[in-house]
Amino acid sequence: MPDWSESQREAYLTLALVPGIGAARLLTLLDRFDTPDGALSAPFELLRTINGISDATAAAIRSASRTATRQILGALRAIGGHLLLPSDSAFPVALLQIPDPPTCLFVLGKLEALERPAVAVVGSRNHSAYGAEVCRGVARAATQAGLAVVSGMARGLDAVAHAGALDASGLTIGVLGNGLDVTYPAANRKLYTQVAEQGLLLTEFPPGERPSVGSFPRRNRLISGLARVTVIVEAAISSGALQTAECGLQQGREVMAVPGPITSPVSAGTNRLIRDGAAPLLELDDLLVHYPEVGRPGTPNAAAEPGALAPVEGRIVNALWAGPRRVEDLVEACGAPVWAALDALSALELGGRVRQESGGLYRLMTPALFR
């Protein structure tokens, strides 16, 4: 596409917002009429002869309102947002390579976030404390390594991923299933503001567009499409996060999953992904091997590495994968004398592998780089 004038950009957006016009039909129209203005002003009888353009679509093109488009662009300017067309240098090349690329993007925030190699980090709205800890840690470690963290601005682990990236002063991209001026869910209003100021909000829906059932699958394909790797932290069998994983697989992207207890419903989906061939995410290098251009933010504490565990320590760690347990349960599970189990617990605490909580419960910590 050429470097169009503002009038032609306005005409392009008018075409792009016509129901039934996707990227493929839009390109067909531009190939036939050279410019967006030419397509908008084409006679109905000529439009309906073009391959893929039905009578209903031709009628919709003829009745498309540039006044409505100007109102959308005015609302976008009012909030400080920008329109990105595929011909713009800032438009993410990764999204041009997916099967159903967006015809345009509405963005708010730091465009430089789109220049970073990106990882998508998503998960369930309903999650465990373990899932939240791992999710925040993955996001922090990824941004410290120089990656942008992409997620869907939803309740639960999406919000945790964005917050983890912001905590590390990193760049994060929030992909929305609605317009930039619509805060959904309302509980994420503060997070919306933070991401817009410190990262980037991105959507293919114009200002004023409310979320709908169909908008979230479309959002999900952009989340995985922006990222080289999609990480699913926790997901129940019916979780929308699994839809994002499916999008990533269809786009030829790498999908990784964080393993969890087989007794946990919120890890059922991620464990199945691993069983079916997704790579497990156990440590930062599992992720960064897909990003050879970025550096490592540090090296793990040797005491926290599985290979450095004594046999009793290893049995305690295995027992804690199922969830927090009391010391007497751990003594029984590891099959060692009480003094040996207590010594092992002390060593694991000092190494950052386990933590004692209120009520005398011990719980497994995530690896040092994911805390």
Image (cartoon, rainbow, N blue to C red):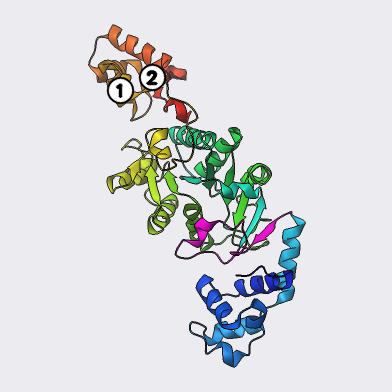
The part of the chain drawn in magenta is: 80-104
Q: Which residue position is annotated with label 1?
A: 307
| Furthest residue in direction left, as rendered | 335
Does 337 sit above or below residue 240? Answer: above
| Residue 268, label in figure | none
The three-letter amino acid code for the residue at tag 2 is: Ala
Q: Is residue 60 located in the magenta-colored stretch of the structure?
A: no
- Expressed as whole percent of the image width and height from the top left, the position of residue 92 reads 56, 56
For the question of whether residue 55 can be seen, the reply is: yes
Q: How many marks?
A: 2
Where's residue 153, x and y in %?
A: 57, 48
**Residue at figure coordinates x 52%, y 76% from the top left:** 25
Q: Is residue 20 at least partly visible in the picture?
A: no
Amino acid at pointer 1? Gly
Q: Residue 28, how many percent across, how many down?
A: 53, 78
User: Residue 302: which disc?
Assistant: 2
For the residues labelled 1 and 2, say whether their Cβ atoms are less than 8 Å apart: no
Along the viewing direction, whichever of 365 and 284 lies nearer the viewer: 284
Lateral position of residue 123 relative to residue 153, left or right: left
The residue lying toward the viewer, choosing from 178 and 151, is 151
